[in-house]
Image: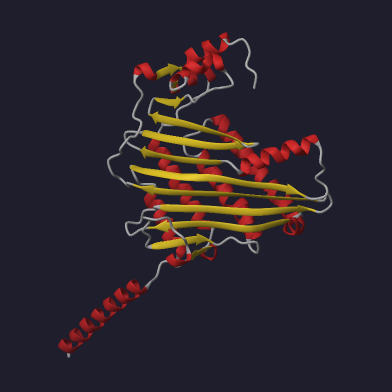
């Protein structure tokens, strides 16, 4: 009898283990879990490369938008904004800390195209910004091609405020992890959806195991905003205040910001129906591609909205598209720029002295 009981117990144990294994294998992660784990993994990277672009859209129309010199200037700015584009590329490394970023801006102002190329380099002690052509300041044309050198310690002494973007990288990573956890703790599964790769046009060369979209639409954006303001942002401000990365004065400002958030939420709720009536979310896509190694090789933000103000006879539409590709995860960085040589550098104090000698600058 004892022998039979032992056999029965062994069989039941095996069946229990198999049931656990089968249930574990069959458990499918939600889109929110997939995205959270991918970004958590991204925050552990020591190095990666990136490239992308940023475009803005804006327009104002309606009977209330009078044909005056002031409105003509506004339209000129909006037109230039729509015809402009910012592209960027670079490489970032955590330890030892070094980042390079190359900004390319194309601006079209009344048919006159202007291009700016601004390389930026950072390490633990200094930042270098390459000076572009300054046609508006001919006295400084000889500076073109030089790197403006910004020493963090020197800037701290001049401003009497601590300035060091590279300070305590570990604490910055810990804070980023906390902010990531706070967001996904409060924003539930309903706001995320995994889509078929064929439904999203990914750039050539991007391989994705999962594609996740943030599901915010014109029907649920009010609830989403309330969720962020009531839950995510207050807790995020607390995390920043407790991170050890801010001064006592900045902690006080964060406390005031929390109080202002609460007031803003109350006002938002009082005017919620008016907001729904006037603000239309035409498109809000935040797409993230995740590969087999749980890295994020591509993200896309595509946003368009319209604000209708009937009492003034004006309709404002605006939008932004930001797309970014990432690669070379944890590989040895290949620096395109490198740290500038001594003869390529212009210290900040020298630039200050030169600017004081310029008689007049007409912008």
Q: Please state the horizontal and vertical placement of residue 334, each as a whole percent of the image.
A: 30, 38
84 sits left or right of 18 in the view: right
Seen in the picture, residue 304 relative to 164 is either above or below; the reply is below
Q: Outermost residue toward the left?
A: 3
In-front residue for pair 170/8:
170
- Which residue lies at the image location 56% right of the left edge and 45% below the top edge? 55
Structure colour scheme: secondary structure
Q: Please state the horizontal and vertical placement of residue 212, each as a whole percent of the image.
A: 46, 61
Seen in the picture, residue 27 relative to 206 is either above or below; the reply is below
Seen in the picture, residue 127 relative to 25 is either above or below; the reply is above
Q: Please state the horizontal and vertical placement of residue 240, each as a whole percent of the image.
A: 51, 40
Q: How many marks?
A: 0
- Which residue lies at the image location 49% right of the left edge and 45% below the top edge? 53
In-front residue for pair 120/95:
120
Q: Please state the horizontal and vertical placement of residue 332, each as a whole percent of the image.
A: 27, 40
The C terminus - image quarter: top right
- Which residue lies at the image location 61% right of the left edge and 62% below the top edge? 217
285 sits left or right of 335 in the view: right
Residue 50 visible to an observer of this rendering:
yes
In-front residue for pair 163/351:
351
In-front residue for pair 113/132:
113
Q: Outermost residue toward the bottom?
A: 1
289 sits left or right of 4 in the view: right
């Amino acid at each position: 009898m004892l022998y039979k009981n032992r056999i029965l117990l062994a069989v039941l144990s095996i069946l229990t283990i198999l049931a656990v294994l089968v249930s574990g294998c069959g458990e499918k992660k939600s889109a929110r879990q997939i995205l959270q784990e991918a970004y958590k993994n991204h925050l552990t990277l020591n190095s990666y490369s990136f490239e992308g672009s940023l475009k803005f859209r804006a327009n104002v129309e309606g009977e209330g938008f009078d044909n005056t010199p002031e409105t003509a200037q506004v339209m000129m700015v909006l037109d230039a904004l729509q015809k402009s584009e910012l592209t960027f590329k670079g490489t970032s490394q955590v330890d030892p800390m070094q980042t390079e970023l190359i900004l390319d801006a194309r601006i079209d102002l009344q048919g006159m195209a202007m291009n700016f190329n601004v390389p930026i380099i950072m390490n633990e002690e200094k930042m270098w910004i390459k000076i572009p052509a300054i046609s508006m300041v001919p006295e400084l044309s000889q500076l073109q091609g030089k790197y403006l050198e910004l020493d963090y310690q020197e800037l701290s002494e001049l401003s009497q405020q601590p300035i060091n973007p590279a300070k305590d990288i570990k604490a910055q990573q810990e804070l980023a992890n906390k902010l990531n956890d706070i967001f996904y703790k409060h924003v539930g599964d309903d706001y995320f959806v995994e889509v078929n790769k064929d439904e999203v046009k990914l750039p050539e060369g991007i391989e994705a195991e999962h594609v996740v979209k943030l599901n915010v639409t014109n029907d649920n954006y009010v609830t989403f905003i309330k969720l962020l303001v009531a839950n995510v942002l207050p807790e995020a401000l607390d995390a920043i205040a407790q991170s050890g990365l801010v001064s006592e004065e900045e902690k006080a400002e964060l406390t005031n910001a929390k109080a202002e958030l609460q007031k803003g939420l109350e006002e938002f709720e009082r005017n919620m129906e008016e907001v729904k009536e006037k603000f239309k979310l035409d498109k809000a896509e935040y797409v993230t591609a995740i590969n087999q190694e749980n890295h994020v090789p591509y993200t896309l933000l595509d946003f368009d909205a319209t604000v209708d103000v009937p009492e003034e006879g004006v309709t404002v539409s605006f939008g932004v598209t930001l797309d970014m590709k990432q690669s070379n995860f944890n590989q040895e960085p290949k620096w395109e720029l490198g740290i500038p040589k001594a003869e390529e550098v212009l210290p900040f104090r020298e630039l200050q002295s030169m600017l004081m000698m310029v008689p007049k600058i007409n912008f």
